[in-house]
Amino acid sequence: MLSNNHTSEWLHSLPQGKYDQVIDDVRKKTPNMSKQMKERQQQLYNTKLEALHSRQAKKQQQQQKQHTKKIKLTQSIQNLGGIWTKPEVFDAFKVACVRDQDLKEAIVTQLQLRKHVLGSTGPRHLFQQQHKGKSFSIPELSANLMEAINLDKDEPDAKQEAKLQYREEGELASEMTRLKKSLGQKVEENRQKVIISQQKEMLQKFVEHPETLVGKTFKHKCKDPESNTIEWFAGKVLPIYQNNKQASKTEYQIKYDGTFHFLETWKKVT
């Protein structure tokens, strides 16, 4: 703001007396302005805090309302002999019911319980008393309830089938072996990544100071081009054989541990 309003230029353009007066006024008003700013910040903080508490209270009220509704539905369903899981139970209730209003309320209670307590899936209108401004008749509500019962009948089997998998003992042992092998491969891959990372760091040090490589052990990888057989030969770096201005071309004497078929390997690669 000071930059956009060119306050500094305006201030320095004032006569010395006026300049001193403005500076003196600012010094006197600064404590009061600072106090007002802190009060404003506190007001904003309190406003945000109240809004947060209001949202939390509203959420708790909604949760309490849903909980109360579930309790009422559970109590009402007990008066109907429990939840209807088979069409035969519904048919028996219809025969015993005298008033259509009682039958309608019973159907609505069964639908509401499935929606709000059991969490049944299905089209939204399936659990409502009306759709697009038109109230459902008793036959329509009955059809909706039958559809909801059939949906609930199929859903547990699908969920249970997804959760439980039965396997033969031999198949389970084979799967465990596969998982162990897969885990071992991942561990080995990560180990190789760490080794490669360490080797890159060490290589830079050896290039800068070739003599530090002396005394280190190594493994020489050899691959048969005909059979693709890979062999590793361990060895040790001996004193430098010949220095080179280009450090990466420094020549070393090496000693292999055990037997290394040097001539045979040389013959295959030449």
Image (cartoon, helix red, strand yellow):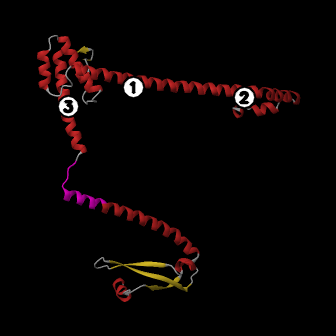
How many angstroms separate mark 3 from mark 2 (CA)? Answer: 66 Å
Residue ranking furthest to the bottom: 263
Name the residue located 24 percent from the left edge and 14 percent from the top edge.
134
Q: Earlier in the sequence, mark 3 or mark 2?
A: 2
Select label 3 or label 2 by which is in front: 3
User: On the picture, is 59 further left or further right than 179?
Assistant: right
Is the residue marked by circle 1 packed among few (<14), some (14-19), or many (20+) residues within 10 Å? Answer: few
Q: Return the residue at label 3.
A: 151
Give yes or no for contact between labels 1 and 2 (Cβ–Cβ under 8 Å). Answer: no
Q: In this rendering, is residue 130 above or below 17?
A: above
Say the numbered circle drawn on residue 159: none
Residue 34 is marked as 2
Residue type pointed to by label 2: Ser
Q: To which residue does mark 1 refer?
A: 63
Residue 179 in percent (x, y) is at 30, 59
Q: Is residue 252 above or below residue 158?
A: below
Q: Quarter-wise, where is residue 81 in the image?
A: top left
In this rendering, which labeled residue sits more in front, label 1 or label 3?
1
Q: Which residues are magenta?
A: 165-179
Residue for point 18% across, 25% down: 84
